[in-house]
Each structure stands twice: as C-alpha cells, then as structure tokens.
Amino acid sequence: MDNANDITADLIAVVVAVNGHEPRVLTIGRANVLPSGPFELGHRSLQSGLRSWVEEQTGQPLGYIEQLYTFADRDRVGTGQRVISISYLALTREEEATQSARRRWQRWYDYFPWEDHRSGAPSMLARVLRPRLLKWADSAGDNETRRERRQRAAVAFGFDERQWNEELTLQRYELLYEAAMVGEAAGGQPSAALSSAAGESMIADHRRILATGIARLRSKIKYRPVVFELMPPVFSLLQLQRTVEALAGRLLHKPNFRRLVEQQELVEQTGETTADTGGRPAKLYRFRHGVLDERAIAGAKLPLTRA
Amino acid sequence: MDNANDITADLIAVVVAVNGHEPRVLTIGRANVLPSGPFELGHRSLQSGLRSWVEEQTGQPLGYIEQLYTFADRDRVGTGQRVISISYLALTREEEATQSARRRWQRWYDYFPWEDHRSGAPSMLARVLRPRLLKWADSAGDNETRRERRQRAAVAFGFDERQWNEELTLQRYELLYEAAMVGEAAGGQPSAALSSAAGESMIADHRRILATGIARLRSKIKYRPVVFELMPPVFSLLQLQRTVEALAGRLLHKPNFRRLVEQQELVEQTGETTADTGGRPAKLYRFRHGVLDERAIAGAKLPLTRA
DNA sequence: CATTGTTATATTCGCCTCGAGTATAATAAA
DNA sequence: TTTATTATACTCGAGGCGAATATAACAATG
C-alpha cells in the first residue's frame, strides 16, 4: 500500500483586505509565504482546516471563503511523496493595522507592479517588459512559435492598440514566468535591469496562486456583490468605489458607478453623513444583506472607463 | 506518521457529449457511476491521471478538460482514512453510438428531469416539486426559517412570477436534497408519487458533481466558445443552436443566435451546404480556432428568449 | 408544374444598458 | 466672499439585444 496512499493535501490561503486605497494579501514569516498547512484528520472539512491554519499562523479569523484551484506539485525529490495543493481565496477586513512578526499585510502591487493602472499604464510596461517579451518571442526556433508568442504577449498585456484587460493577471504572470522574467523562473534571479519591474518573488508557486486569486476576484466583483466583504459596516459610495478601483487596478466613472450601485439596490442609507471627506459631506450606506437571498446572481458589473 | 498521510485523492470526471438533441454524460457499470479513480504516483499530473482513468474505464479519449471542484468526503467509517475528491468537466464528441458494458452514455435529463425547459417548464415542477418544497419549508421550526426556505425555493425554481435561471442547477439539486426529495438524501428512496419527478439517483455524491458540471457548462457557454468542443468539425448554424439549446435546457431566438455567432466571427464558412435538413440547404461552417488566440474572452453570450 | 410546407437567411424596429459628459449642491479653507 | 473640493443629480447617445417580419431555396405532393 505504498502507492495511492503517499499523498499529502496542503491548504493554501490568499487572504485579501483593502486598507485605504491599497489591496493587500496576508503573508507569514519573512513576507513571501502564504498561510498554509496540511489537511488533517482532525479537520471537519477542507474549509475549516484552512480556517484553523490561517488563524493559528496569523491570528486572523476568516469570513468569506471560496475555492480557487487544486493542483499537484511536481514530486518532492527523493521522498517519492506527492503533495496536492488546494488553494482558497478569502476576503476579510484588516482590523488592526498592527503588523506582527508572524503576520504581515503586503501590498498586491509589490508583487505585481504591472497590474496597477489607476494612474495610467505603468511606464515600465512599455519601457521594460514589452521589449523583453518581444526579445523572448523572437528567440523562438520557428516562425510559427514567434508569431504565437508575440500574439499572446500582445493580448495579455494590451500591446499594439489592444485594450488592457485587468482580468488576465494569471496569464500575464505565466507569460513572464515562461520568459524567465520573474525570480521564480528557472533562470534564477531576474537581471538587475529587470528586477524592480519584475516585482517581489514568493516561495514555490505562491505568487502564481496569488495571481489566480487576484484574477478571480477581479472577475467576480463584476457579477457578485463580494466587495462588501472587504468594506467596514458603514461606508460612503466613494469609499466603495475606491475599494473596487483598488482591486480592479483601474479607475471608474463616478456617476455611473453610483447609478449602478443604487439602481441595483445593493446598499441602503444609514441616514447619517460623514464630513471626513474634505468637501461636501457624504451620505453613509450599509450593505443590504437581503440581496444575497433575493437574487441568485446580483450582477454587479463595473462601469469601466479610461477616466 | 499516521496523521496527515492517510489521504487518498480521487479523480472524478463529468464527461459530456451531445448526441442529436440530447446532452449526455458518460457513466460506467450499471449506469449510475461517474468514471473515477485514485490519483497515483505514476500520473504526471491530475489531468493526465484523470485522462488515463477515463480511458481505461470507458475507452473514451478526452479533449477539453477543466477542473470543477475539490471536496473532502466525510470519513469513510472505521478506516480513519480520508478521501479528497477532485472533480473535472470534460467535453467530447460521442464518436460511436455504441454503448458497451463498460461505458454508457446517459441523458442528463434522466437525472434532472426538472432542468429541461425546451418545451416549456415541465409540468411536474408546479404539480409535484413545488407543493413538496412548500411543505418542507413550512415544516421548519421557526418563522424565519420558513420564510427563508420559501424564498430559496422560489429563487432557485423560478416560482411566484420569478424567472427561470438555467444556471442554478446545483442550487436546485441541493435544495431537493435538503428537502429529502431525491433518492440520495437521508430519508432513503423518495416516495412513489415523487419518484419519477425526482429523477434517477447516482451513487454517493456523483449526482451532485454532475449538477456542478451542468451548472458550470451552462454558465461557460455564455462567455467562452466551448460549445465547439462538442460539435463535429463541420456543422450548420442550426445544429450549433440546437446543441446550445440542449445544454441550456431552453430555446433560443434563431435570428439573434445567428447574428451573435456571425458578428463575433466565431465561425467561417466551408463553402459547402447540406440538404439533410429538409428545407432550404444550410451553409456549413467550421470553428475559427484563431479566436482562441486573438481574444482572451470571446464573449459568446446567449440571446435568451421564451421563443 | 404549380402549390404547399419547411428550413435557411436577411433586415428592421425599439427598448434598455451603459459609457460619457455636464450641471448643481454642500462643505472647508483662503 | 471667493475658491477648491467633494457629493449628488441629470442628460445624451451609441450599441447590445430581444423581438418580429420578410425573403430565399429546397422537397414533397397532387
């Protein structure tokens, strides 16, 4: 029986919160490791196993959880043992800003500097990434592969008049990995010229899992009211908009955003206002939890624009 | 070391094909079992493990595959061993109609008779399922639970003037399970009055997995060109439409369907026509595989209508 | 060979969504 | 009081899409 049984199942969490205008991910240790641990007999379910590992490693209790993806790692050399990794996305509020030795909230965009387009496309995209990707494409053996690589890069990164698509986070990371432009790739550390543009590395394939979580979240906020998991109980519409923008990595059209949120009846007024915003006091709202029952698909599409 | 290690990972496949106007799922044995088998050391990856199990058990080679969901079964009594199940959706063409002892193509709607709305809402919905569900709702202890159960049933099944939403296949099955209205539920076999409306049962939670696959596919055909995995290399637009309708369980508006497919440039004409259709000969088309590279999201929304 | 039925294909209409722009209101600071 | 800043409200217009209708090309029938 040393065959099918030699398996360990690891649970890995991408825990997201938005602090101010920055989306963050929960890490442990020296900041490049996602919370994770093996699924054990004591765990009632995969989800509860994940919860207890995250809480044990970071002290952070989790609310909303959804499964991301399951994959089998390549053999752990020598041992002849295989590891199955089951990754989850968790949304929470970053209660205290207190960083500790064991838990650390890291900015998304430190790992993916090319993903934040809120102040326009980062200049390093055209300046650093594009030429390197083209060079990689042209280094291919045959003509067909060259053409295909150029096209993949153009689609993923929005080169050549194409539109930037914020949901392609995973494809972009995989492309950079394939081109050995990120630290995790076979070629080892990226060159000095690239290093700042390549973003921070993580151990094993944790950055890939993070990319999967970002992509899932960016897609999901458009048709399910999950943003509210990241909001405080009471908020202004602009706060809500800024949170969505932080996640999507792009700016939204304010009047249209308001129209959408209001006519979908996702929120209700508390009756109070806040003057913390600098200008005219903003009305405060809370999430209408009823929508979760009333509608199966509360389509909350984003009104995207170049702003 | 008898703790984290006592785990088996099972791979389970929902293999779908559309024959004529009927979507089917590949089963083995006495027709109520999905192809499955343990993930083993010899498998290069989860996907390749799945492929070899399906091929070994049914002789069916697989093309398109995507992961559905991973879950941990409740303890297998006594053994103290846990099983993790990783389920996949596979799309293929039902090459030969030859059923054999080991493989059998079963109609979706034998398992989910309430899911086929192509000739209007099945009468058993209002006649059998609705009263039973209401009875179950009213059997709850407190008022709040009763209200919530009624609402869940109404949303999932489109009662009380609500719209039928074909993507809620999983929620509907779970609701029926909770109400002990399907054979797999705790109460054992459903009553005779219910049995035909409850659909065929499957072993363990295979029917739940099938429901997950149906829901996923019904959702995905709307924004990714996956239907073509189920089509022969050359087809008419009406054939394509009938296939989509079979999957969605509802009829589409013909002119709008054509407009959508054509203006998205998903297909190209072969130049030939077929007279097999009875009336005016139909032009034949093939899938433009180029779209998979050109676009990241080939939004193929369905123009839905009551027809 | 004209009639009829059936399917394929083309065109049009109109509502509603949503991107985009502009106008007005209410506060703080200068 | 002026100006800056933010909040809130309204309007316009293109495009997507549901819906209906019109025309074309075949087979079958008498």
Image (spheres, coloured by chain):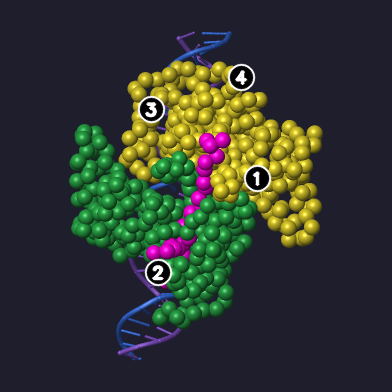
Chain colours: A green, B yellow, C purple, D blue
Q: Chain letter of disc 2? A: A
Residues at discs 3 and 2 in contact (Cβ within 8 Å): no
Determine which residue is flagged by label 1. B80
- Same chain for the residues at labels 3 and 4, yes or no? yes
* Picture coordinates of residue A137, whole percent (x, y): 23, 42
Residues at marks 2 and 4, CA–CA distance in whole angstroms: 61 Å
Residue B249: where, in percent of width, then height? Answer: 58, 36
Q: Quadrant of residue B98?
A: top right
Q: Quadrant of residue B112?
A: top right
What residue does disc 4 label?
B101
Amino acid of disc 4: Ala
Which-is-in-front pick, marks 1 and 3? Answer: 1
- CA–CA distance in space, label 3 to label 2: 48 Å
Q: CA distance from mark 4 to mark 1?
A: 34 Å
Q: Tag 3, which chain?
A: B
Neighbor class of circle 4 (other Cα within 10 Å; few <14, some 14-19, many 20+) is few
Residue at 67% of width from left, 52% of height from top? B152
Magenta segment, prevailing SS (helix, strand or loop): strand
Q: Nearer the viewer, mark 4 or mark 1?
A: 1
Residue A265 sits in quarter: bottom right
Chain letter of the residue carrying label 1: B
Residues at discs 2 and 1 both on one chain: no
Q: Find out whether the residues at labels 2 and 1 contact each other: C-beta distance under 8 Å.
A: no
Q: Do the residues marked 3 and 2 share a common chain?
A: no
The stretch drawn in magenta includes residue B170:
no
- Residue at horizontal 54 percent and vertical 56 percent from the top: A50
Instruction: Report the front residue among D24 and A137.
Output: A137
How would you rate the neighbour count of disc 2 (Cα within 10 Å): few for under 14, some for 14-19, many for 20 or more? few
Same chain shared by disc 2 and disc 4: no
- Cα–Cα span, label 1 and label 3: 53 Å
Question: Depth check: A170 or B114 in front?
Answer: A170
User: What stretch of residues is rendered in magenta?
Assistant: A1-30
